Image: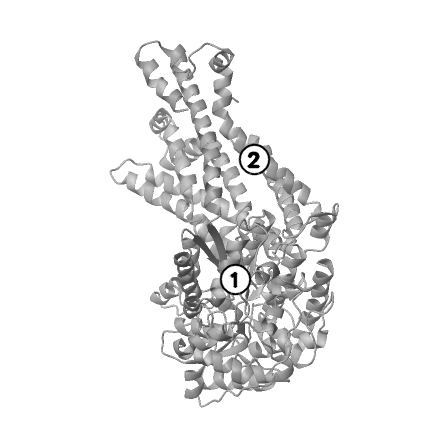
Amino acid sequence: MKAYKKIVAALAASAALVSVAACGSGTGSSSKADSNKITVAWWGNQQRNERQAKVNKLFEAANEGVTVDGQFSEWDDYWKKLSTNAAGNKMPDVVAMDYSYLQQYIDNGLLVDLDQYIKDGTIDTSDIDDNVLSAGRIDGKTYALSLGNSAPALIYNKTLTDKAGITVPDNMTVDQFVDISKQVYEKTGVKTNFRYYEASELLEYILRGDGKQLFGDGKLGAGEQDVEDYLGIYQQGIEEGWHVAPEIFAQIKAGSVEQDPLVYGTDNAARSWCSFKFNSQLNAMQAVLTDGSELAMTNWPSADAKKAGYVKPSMFFVITKSSKNPELAAKYIDFYTNNEDAVKTMLTDRGLPVNAKMMDAIESDLDEGDQKSVAYLNDVVIPNSSAINPPAPAGATEVNSTLLPSIEEEVLYGKKSAADAAKEFVSEANDALASAK
Amino acid sequence: MSQATATLPDSARDGRGARAAGLSFRKEGALQTLLHKESVAGYVCAFPFIFGFLMFMIVPMILSLYYSFTDYSIIGDARFIGLDNYIEMFTQDDLFWKSLGVTFLFALVSVPLKLVFALIVALLLLRNSKASGFYRAAYYLPSILGGSVAIAILWRQMFATDGVINQMLGVFGIESRFAWLGDTRTAIWTLIILAVWQFGSSMLIFLASLKQIPAELYEAASVDGASRWTRFWRITLPLLTPTIFFNLVMQMINGFLAFTQCYIITQGKPLNSTLFYMVHMYDESFTNYHAGYGAAMAWVMLVLVGAVTLFLFATKRFWVYDEEA
């Protein structure tokens, strides 16, 4: 018995030693492998994930011995994962960055300054317009490279509105939009989703139309009356029956393109004739729609389309300070932006390519949806737009992802009047912005 | 190292026995004597656990206690703010109280229901038949699957307006388009039903302890003319109380810490009527970037779970059968 115990002990001891030894050599070889491996993370839908995976393969093929590990998540989960990675200094090398989060990540020193790579030519920006580059430039340093331009777009089911004999004009006012929503409901029974349970871009957009800025300096740039007008649309929609009921939203994942009421519901009460999205999302939504309906788009409603409209860098690539191989990461960004095959693979998934030459190269490859997207940006938005608001401050995250959705929910369920909800929203949003300063 | 492992079978075969068998060293030395000690074997075997316990339990707990006194945004640095997080939680955060209420309702309703259900199924499966093995496995399955994302999504589909539940009601002539997940009165019950459905592990423990009850007791009772019902109330249930107690404590703790069901199926909707404490904590930490506040919430929950467990132990002497007493 005793002998047996000793054998076990010796085995355990040698096993422990072996594993320690294995660890030692393991880290040695893996750090060697690290120099040829980069991790790229983005948020997205099925279509983007497939295209991005192809680009990663192309990059591997063009650079022998290099492996790209692609990681994708849905929008909500993406930011949770990234922040946790940031805390452990384990962020992927290249990450997709949104305009609304950019400032926080720069403020906390988590991103690498790209100017050095632009200067030494690793990232070639000669064919990129300076206006585009400046979107990722904060305090004179380029931290982020825009991957494409996009603009807010009201994507709607044209087959449905045509059948009902309703024309949806460009540059609508909010009242016109409400009118159309009512007509659609009366004629078809299909309801409306006024960007319920998503971030605050629509509120921001409508405020811009009135010459106001949602996130001012450390406090809300909107008054209670402004918010009340906005929330009043939900209240009116529920009272008059043309807004999708909140019970429906309890069954879907908010913000997901695949489950958006425009394309997902089977039942008229669960469907919306339109969705407040961005023009780059048209194709992804069209792909989910299986009943053969055709989607079209126009700009979001506001009092003044020119003041409200803006072109947004749809997203950026940044290199994180966790990256062990920022040169290779920079090479990847360059490949993504300037390589013809890569651009032809992504097409307009992240908006129109920023490289002007590539824009010409892909023109013949654009399918109908892409062409609509291009035409919309060039013909509708650019003539009717003004400069984008500065990047959102840190507390804006809480306003976007928690405060506004829950206030909208209370209005839709009839728990609070638009006026009371507006009062609460303004005071809580100001608290959140002040405490995050 | 390779040499060391190679010597092992050799020395074992040539009959030098245990003294040499455990050794990878040719010469007797201090190290060898050390390795021979019983206590060393103990430490070596316990090392993986001790290491894991320190690294993955104690260190994170200490860190989390520290962060609970800070304003920590995860992507930034932590700033010490004393008791502010705790003060805010008790005085200003309505959702803290709301989620606490939801979690208590969930745990206090789902756990007793689950135990009753588990006990009934265990009694049914006690009979030895050819199929009983199959049924035991089949009923245990939900416990394994129930916490998974797939089941959570299935649940969401089932209770949707055009889901299976409403269709089944249609079969019985009740035309229903009711949004079970969209109504504040019913949403929490869909989560409770899911929890009760995961009765398998409690059921197995009940089964094992039902088999421990001596058959003589039942025989004696039958001779005295006790009915099945009396036998259950007078013999089975009293002798089962220690197991019931164990299941109750374990499931209660699980109930308070429930997360997945809410996070995936309802996300707290509608109107936070299904917002579990753990999900609120997660949202504060990772959505709103108030990780310090989240850490403080975790410690409050730890104290609460501890208090509930102590309370259960305090009631033990009133209803749990103790062989030694």
Expressed as whole percent of the image width and height from the top left, the position of residue A319 reads 56, 57
Of all chains, the one bearing label 2 is B
Q: Image height check: is A367 above or below B71? A: below
Asked whether the viewer can see residue B293, the reply is yes
Image point (36%, 30%), residue name:
B211
| Badge 2 amino acid | Met
Q: Image height check: is A169 above or below A353? A: below
In the image: residue A252, left or right of residue B59: left
Image point (41%, 35%), residue name:
B205
Disc 2 designates what residue? B55
Q: Image height check: is B131 above or below A219? A: above
Mark 2 vs mark 1: same chain? no
Decide which of A393, A341 is in the foreground and name it.
A341
Return the mark for residue B249: none
Expressed as whole percent of the image width and height from the top left, the position of residue A264 reads 43, 71
Image quarter (top left, top right, bottom left or bottom right) of the C terminus of chain A: bottom right
Decide which of A5, B210 is in the foreground and name it.
A5
| Badge 1 amino acid | Trp
Expressed as whole percent of the image width and height from the top left, the position of residue A82 reads 56, 54
Count residues near mark 1 (Cα–Cα under 10 Å), then give few for <14, some for 14-19, many for 20+: some
Disc 1 designates what residue? A75
Decide which of B297, B219 is in the foreground and name it.
B297
